[in-house]
Image: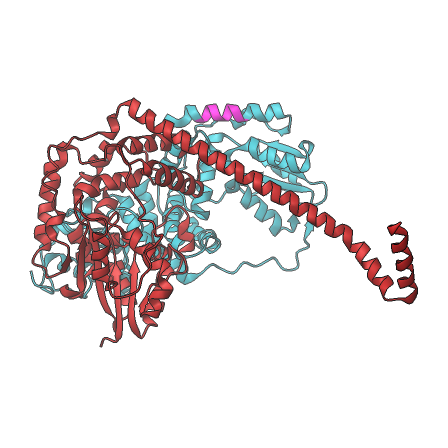
Chain colours: A cyan, B red
Amino acid sequence: MPAGAPTRGWGWARHLREGGTTPWVDWSEPAAPFTTDHLPGAELLELLRRLNATGPSEPGRVDALLRTSPPGRGRRDLPLVGDTDNRTYGPPPVDPATLRPRELLRAASVRLAEDLLDAGAPPTSKPAGQERRKLPYRLVGAPWLTLPIREEMERQGRLPGAAGYTVYVLGGPLDEIAAAAWKFRTFTNRVNPWSIWMRDAQWRGWLGPRADLPRIARWWADRVGKERVEIVTDPALLPGLLGVDSVPGPWAVSAESNEVARVIGQVLSVRTDLKAQRRLLIHRLRPQLEKLEPLVPDARELGVPEESLDWVEGQARGQRDALLEAGYALHGDPDRLLPSGKATQGPDERRALALALSLLAGHS
Amino acid sequence: METGRRVLLHVGTPKTGTSYLQDVLFHNRETLAEQGVHYFADRFDAHFLAALDLMDLPWGGIEEEATGAWDALAAKVRAVENGTVIISHEILATASWQQAKHALESLGEDSEIHIMLSARDLARQIPAEWQENVKHRSVVTYAEFLEEIRDPAREGRIGSWFWGVQELPDILDRWTQGIAPDRVHLITVPPPGSPSTLLWERFAAAFGLDDVTIDLEGIDRGNPSLGVPEAALLREVNLAVVPVLEPADYRPFVREFLAHRTLAKRRDSARLALSPDILPWVESLSESWVEALSGRGYDVVGGLDELLVPSDLAGKPFVDPDNIPARQVLDVGVATIEALLQEAIRLRTSEARLEEEVAELHAELEHTRSLVPKERAREGLERRWWGRAMLKVYRLVRRR
């Protein structure tokens, strides 16, 4: 077929570019290419079709989306089944409606990362006129749980590290702490999908430094002495220990928001440095996702899959016993370190895609 | 309108002598620049980083060093007014249509761009890619690997990568957007048994390096293949160490020391080949690729027929790395332990030498410190008449 000849694929692409939502299998009109580019892959065209279904987008934004490619590893540039491409090689043609949500999410990730880079991280401002003084505490443990508290304390001018400070190691049910460790990495670094992360942790026999309370406690005990390290298994006791009325909980995002951040983070890890990546994800993307959460139903809480719970339970018992044996002061029931089994699912990839589409549509 | 800038963009494929070519170019970059051939690289993996950047491809943490690397490389290319620029990395083979288009545009529309692709028959590429996986922390068995690459949907991580970097007609479609066929150069790897210099001669001819002065002395031919028991052992080692070794430690200790410097040196073991049950599929696939490529008008350095499965392959014994006798793996294990012991001894000797040096330096430092007050006192006395007199008396007393 001569280059520039009308094809059904280009007809569908033109329809989608103009805001259409007709599925590929129902499309029959051919059209000539509207650009010298190769026909975008089925994954991008289907993503655009789903985006159009949420409402109209600016033409410039649509073209920018169509100029991207799914990043990293994995198949892409997928031809449309039944189109006129007669190559005997290359990726096999697909019906775009059958593509998995995670493939579409990956296709969306470059544009979403570019949106964040274009917007930049919001400036951080220190509260004016606030008296700032150091108090004799340090709060450590899984940063997903401790960072919001530390930030709030600092916002109130209650800085950590006054002479003779006590180190509070915040713990909790180990399945939730493991989930917290992964969740934090989705906003701060490059990390594998949750199911693979759990599988690898089990293979390695260790949930990693952020979910290893005895290790954290020991590290601090070596520096300040064991008598100044205290374990907190019940977060409700923290306000009393820190001398405040209340402490904030973790960021209010679902497992799917973590997955969206994770996938965008893969692109940002190449496009910018780690510090900027964290600032963009935590300070720009997270507030957007928090706004979207109530608009997309059926949010999931991340949990350790049932098949791994026994192993996590064994790890948790080991951690509890090690902490008791070491003789640290304890706030709360040590058995609170055992898994709660409250959630046992990973992110729902369909809902993660829905969040990504809302971000692309600018609904946040 | 084209200027006098010629860009040779070498986009793959892996396991075709690319590391050797890149080593030659890197080590000769200054000499080459004097002769009008530019290989812009301030570190040996500079073009690898550029490729990661171009393709938004994370790579075990190395990607953090890749930010902006492609655009920086392209800017250097565009700044050349006259001469040849070479860019080479094999993972570029997997670039998407859009990424390839961006790359070509970024090199300047006034550049005379040539696409270079080195290629080897699938009968050698398939086993080599499995080994490459094993050398990159994978614990996938050979059978699992073959199953993944035969999945027509290419949904798996292994299959999508394999076809991305190996499917020659598709790679060339993606990379030759707007490039005339006579500026597309397909360099085929000579068949087994060919003179060892032949591949380099082909590279040199295709890249126009046969008329320039190049020093090939001391450049490692690099990335040799493993025997079957060696690959099987490495996979077993991965099962044990991958969970506990960070990529930054795995690279020097497992891939470099164990795989390249120890296991690959054993040349007498059986070489990995295609399993007989997939041979017909590979033969037919290779034929279809050669058919797709012939008649395109590319400059073929070597021959398209070299991309077919060698006819003498059928009937050769196949040694299955997934079912290799334990005795053979044990032999390799013992040889590996020996190499590790030698390395431990070398390191201990080196450590002892360094400790000795540190002790000597400490002693010298102490001596120097002890001299400082004495020297100062002497200099102070030398400046005064009565001081000089005191020193004279002191020296007389010491002599007694």
Residue A57: image x %, image y %?
28, 61
Left-right relation of B229 to A206: left
Is residue A97 positioned above or below A198 on the image? below
The magenta stretch is A312-319
Left-right relation of B335 to A5: right
Q: Residue at x 31, y 45 (%)?
A: B223
Q: Is residue B61 visible?
A: yes
Q: Nearer the viewer, residue B345 or A27?
A: B345
Residue B1: image x %, image y %?
22, 77
Left-right relation of B341 to B18: right
Q: Residue at x 45, y 34 (%)?
A: B342
The quarter holding residue A301 reads top left
Figure quadrant of the C terminus of chain A: bottom left
Q: Is residue A66 visible?
A: no
Question: What is the number of callouts on the image?
Answer: 0
The quarter holding residue B73 reads bottom left
Q: Nearer the viewer, residue B181 or A318?
A: B181
Q: Nearer the viewer, residue A192 or B115?
A: B115
Task: Tell me if residue A3 is in the magenta stretch.
Answer: no
Is residue B105 positioned above or below A50 on the image? below
Residue A118: image x %, image y %?
40, 62
Q: Predominant secondary structure in magenta?
A: helix
Q: Nearer the viewer, residue B94 or B133?
A: B133
Figure quadrant of the N terminus of chain A: bottom left
Is residue B156 positioned above or below A206 on the image? below
Residue B37: image x %, image y %?
31, 67
Left-right relation of A123 to B153: right
